[in-house]
Image (cartoon, grey):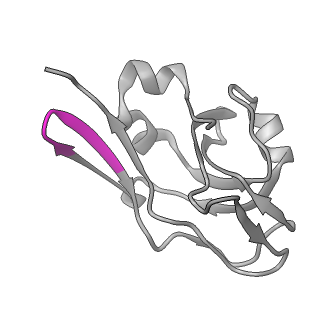
Amino acid sequence: MTKFAHNDVLDNGPAYIKSTCNKMVVVSAYAFGDSYASVMAAMLAEAAMTQSDFVLSSSGNNRVLTTSSIIFDSAANASGLAKNIIFVDSVSSKVLWATEENTPGGHQITQGVRVDFPSLTYTSTQLS
């Protein structure tokens, strides 16, 4: 199970993702700590993001960042099996947050076909 958060996210919390993420991409392969260039080379589809695509809230002691469920790419860039969804800051060439695509075994993407991104949640846990 490959998940990743950039040091800036770990240091500054989920609000950092909300304020700097400008693109969500689905990739065919991701290894922990992959560079921005590696992520973009494995990209199957992408969707532009703005701060309004995120909701920051609380759940008990935790801070929760949730993405909108209406984000889509009108035409996938390539065909392949989607394995991970990556949130990036393309201005600074940073991989902010990586998580697994939530379909068991991955999800087949076809070039030129619309891709709907699922609503995803990043939780910053605080234990009492």
At a point 82% along the width and 67% down the height, the residue shown is: 77
Q: Is residue 5 magenta?
A: no
At a point 41% along the width and 34% down the height, the residue shown is: 16
At a point 41% along the width and 60% down the height, the residue shown is: 53
At a point 81% along the width and 36% down the height, the residue shown is: 37
- Front residue (pair 84, 53): 84
Measuring from the top left, give residue 63's x and y in whole percent. Answer: 25, 37
Tell me the chief SS of the magenta region: strand
Q: In the picture, which quadrant includes the N terminus?
A: top right
Measuring from the top left, give residue 100's x and y in whole percent. Answer: 60, 48
Decide if residue 127 is on the left or right side of residue 4. Answer: left
Q: Which residues are magenta?
A: 58-65
- Front residue (pair 87, 121): 121
Q: Is residue 62 magenta?
A: yes
For the image shown, how many numbered marks are present on the structure? Answer: 0
Measuring from the top left, give residue 2's x and y in whole percent. Answer: 63, 36
Work out whether 117 lies above or below 91.
Answer: below
Work out whether 116 lies above or below 4.
Answer: below
